[in-house]
Amino acid sequence: MSVTARARRFPPGRDSLLRLAPAWTLSGRRYRFHPTLYGLLYTGMIAALLVGSINHNNNLGYLLTFLLGSMLLVAVRSGWRNLREITVTGGRARPVFAGLEARFDLHLQAEGDRCGLLLALDPDRPVTTDLRANGGTGVELALPAARRGVLQARTLHLWTSFPLGLCTVRTTLPVELDCLVYPQPLPGPYSSEGAGEDRDRSRPRPATGGREFSGLAAYRPGDSLQQLHWKSFARGQGLHTRVFAEEESGGAIFSLDRVPGKDLEHRLSRLCQLVLTAEAGSRRYGLRLGATTIGPNRGPGHRDRCLRALALH
């Protein structure tokens, strides 16, 4: 069994010995040391050898006992050297929906090669890596995003059982990681507002570019002269402007007040589903959250703006 495999059996938070592990502050950073299962067996064997050597006054037994004991001390010191002077940069994460995992991209650097490192933002999701002296190493760490809002990670757990797997050395690094968490999409009943009911709506405007023609509208100052319907004017019907279906419908306004239910998170999840559905159908849509109103539009940028408003509401 490799050193990394042995270390995985004792992740932080699950090892009952961790609470009793002694902690020392070395070079301005706090480290904890505790034996692994194999380290406990190894220590027991050394104790048995020492007792036998004392009882029989065996010099070779003393020699073997002290040799094995020195190997344990060397393993502790090597594990500490494996964790010292590691720097972490980066930490960008794409927004995710509640209930999924946020993934942060980190870059680790150190002087000299480092082997058998385990890193985690969530102790139950460790990642194993080796650091190389030239260029560093990039890792992706996961953190559960249980609730909407801004997910913050301020501690990076770092530990190793290198080189013999007899002792685990742990430390933490301060980080500044943030990830935007959108509400979890949830289908449900809803009655949307038309753009005509929105006080901030833009009035229908003529459109070109192959959009479907829907009819004529009375001319209003400011309408494009290129869209005037001259045939109706020639027949004495007055000035009219050609209106296309896509622009005639200013889009729907999804309002938080129109979502049934008293639970805020549940209502925001329903709005999130409506935004995604409207965007997938290439429809124009807007959003109203209390005093905040986002006018009708469409596209990835507009979708992200609406989802961000839902996440931070």
Image (spheres, grey):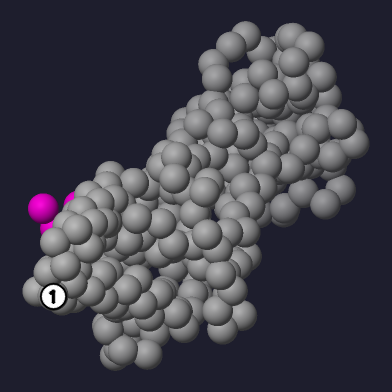
What kind of secondary structure does the magenta stretch mostly adopt?
A: helix
Tell me the crowding category of disc 1: few under 14, some 14 to 19, or many 20 or more residues within 10 angstroms, Cα based.
few
Residue occupying image coordinates x 70% and y 20%: 267
- Residue 249 placement, left or right of 16: right
Q: Is residue 51 above or below residue 68?
A: above
Q: Is residue 197 above or below residue 2?
A: above
Q: Quadrant of the C terminus?
A: top right
- Residue type at mark 1 is Asn
Front residue of 87/73: it is 73
Q: Is residue 182 above or below residue 30?
A: above
Dividing the picture into quadrants, the one containing residue 235 is top right
Residue occupying image coordinates x 84% and y 40%: 292
- Which secondary structure, mark 1? helix
Residue occupying image coordinates x 21% and y 53%: 48
From which residue to which does the magenta span run? Answer: 1-5
For disc 1, the marked residue is 59
Dividing the picture into quadrants, the one containing residue 46 is bottom left
Q: Is residue 48 visible?
A: yes
Magenta span includes 117: no
Measured from the top left, where is residue 6 in percent x and y? 22, 52
Q: Is residue 224 above or below residue 188?
A: below
